[in-house]
Image (cartoon, grey):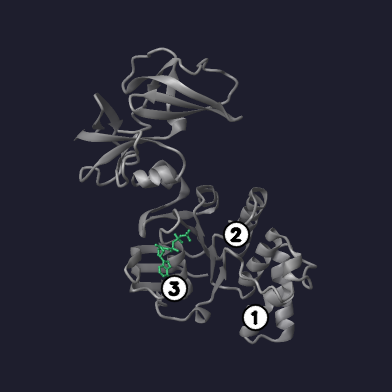
Amino acid sequence: MATVKLQEVVKVFGDVVAVQKLNFTIKEGEFFTFLGPSGCGKTTTLRMIAGFYYPTEGKVLFDEKDMTKVPPEQRNTGMVFQNYALFPHMTVFENVAFGLKLRKLSKSEIKIKVLDALAKVRLKGYEDRQITQLSGGQQQRVALARALAIEPAILLLDEPLSNLDARLRDEMRMEIKRLQKEYGITTIYVTHDQVEALSMSDRIAVFNMGVCQQVGTPYEIYNQPANDFVASFIGETNLFPVILSSITEKSIIVQLEDRIITVKNEPLNSAEGIDKGPVSLSIRPERIKMSTNPIGVPNELEGKVELIQFIGNAMEYEIRWKNYLIKALVLNDGNEIGLKEGDPVWVTLNEDQLRVIPRITEVKKDEK
Ligand SMILES: Nc1ncnc2c1ncn2[C@@H]1O[C@H](COP(=O)(O)OP(=O)(O)OP(=O)(O)O)[C@@H](O)[C@H]1O
C-alpha cells in the first residue's frame, strides 16, 4: 500500500497541453477515481503514475519518494487496460504468471500466486483455458488477476469495464470493489461513467480539459459541486445563468431574468469565488417542489408542464419557464400530484436547496 502524490504536474504533447498543474494526494488504501469526458487528461495522468509517460513539469511521489522519472517496472504498480491487453496466444495461467516470471520467482512460488489470484477473481479451474475461449467478463477477470498477482502497492485501472455489457459491468463493479476492500490496495480508477465513479469511489477527481475541477467524496461532489461543469457532469441538474446582486451573512441574492432569487448562505450551500466572475444557480431535479396552485412562498416560478415521463420509481417532469426547461423528479410513492402535460404549475426553488456556483462553461442555446 502506498500514498500517491502529484505536485504541480503538467504534461504537454507538442502543442497540446494534456494536463495542467495537477495537485492532489491519494491516500493509502483509498479507491480514487479520475472522472471526466473524453480527452480531459485522465489516461495521461494515470500513465504518468504508472511511469509510461514522464511529466513535462512537476513531481509524482509514492510515499513521499520521488518516482517522477522511475521506469514502470520499478514502480510496483499493477495496471488493467481498457482492452485488457492479454496475450492471446498464452493460456490463462501463463497470462497471470507473466509479471511473476519477469520478477524471476521460482516455479512453485509462481504456481501458488497464480492460483491464489485466479481464486480471488473467481476463475479457479480456468488455468489451462486459452484467452480466446473466455467471455469478455472472464477476460477482464484474468486482466485483474494478472495485475493483482504481483501484489502491487498501487492498482491502476483504465476504464476496465467499458467493453462489457451493462449487466456484466454491474457485476464486475461489485467484484472490483470487493477485491479492493479485501486487498486494501490503493486503487486509481479512470472512467467517464459518473455512476461508476459515484458508486465505487472513496474520492473522485473531476477533470475537464486537462484541469482538475474538484476533488471530493461522491457525496461532496454531488451535493457541493465546485462549479457548473461539475454540477452538470455528475448527475442531472438545472442550471440558470444569473447575476449576483449581493452576499449577506444569511443570504446570497441573485437576479434570474426579472426575478430576485434568495439563496441561503451557508458553508455547504455556497462555493468559493462566486464574487469573481459569472455565476449560475444550480438545483437538482429531485430537490424541486411543484404545486398545482400558487403557494405564495419565495422563489416561486409559474411555469407550464411540457413533458411527463414515467420511469417506474419516479416521474420526470419538464417544465417550461421563460426560455428554460426545468427538470423535476418526483419519487413514485403512490400519491399522484395530478399534473398533465399543458397544465400550469408552480415551481419552488427552495432557498436551502439552491447553490450559487462559478460558471465556467458556455450557456446552452435554449437557455438565456
Ligand atoms: N501520446 C499523445 N500524443 C499527443 N497527444 C496526446 C497523447 N496522448 C494524449 N494526448 C492528448 O492529450 C489530451 C488528453 O488525453 P487523454 O487520453 O489523457 O484523455 P482521457 O481523458 O483519458 O480521454 P479518453 O477517455 O478518451 O481516453 C487529449 O487532447 C489527447 O488528444
Identify residue type, mark 1. Leu
Residue 129 figure quarter: bottom right
Q: Is residue 192 above or below residue 287?
A: below
Residue 210: give x, y in percent of width and height: 36, 60
The residue carrying mark 3 is: 62
Tell me the crowding category of disc 2: few under 14, some 14 to 19, or many 20 or more residues within 10 angstroms, Cα based. some
- Secondary element under disc 1, as helix, strand or loop, is helix
Image coordinates of residue 72 in percent, x first then y, are 50, 78
Q: Which label sits in the foreground, 1 or 3?
A: 1
Q: Are marks 1 and 2 in contact (CB under 8 Å)?
A: no
| Separation (CA) of disc 1 from disc 2 | 23 Å
Secondary structure under tag 3 reads strand
Q: Which mark is residue 216?
A: none
Side of 235 relative to 324 (left or right)? right
Residue 3 location in percent, x, y?
45, 68
In this rendering, which labeled residue sits more in front, label 1 or label 2?
Answer: 1
Q: Which residue is mark 1?
A: 100
> Mark 3: is the Cβ under 8 angstroms from ligand 1?
no
Question: SS at mark 2?
Answer: helix
Residue 82 at x, y percent in the picture: 57, 63
Instruction: Kindly identify which residue carries mark 2.
Output: 181
User: In this view of the protein, which residue sits in the foreground, 245 or 153?
Assistant: 245
Which residue corresponds to the image point at 39% horizontal and 43% vertical from the top-left?
Answer: 231
Could one spot residue 248 in this view of the protein?
A: no
Quarter of the rendered image showing ligand 1: bottom left
Of residues 24 and 303, the one drawn nearer to the viewer in this rendering: 303
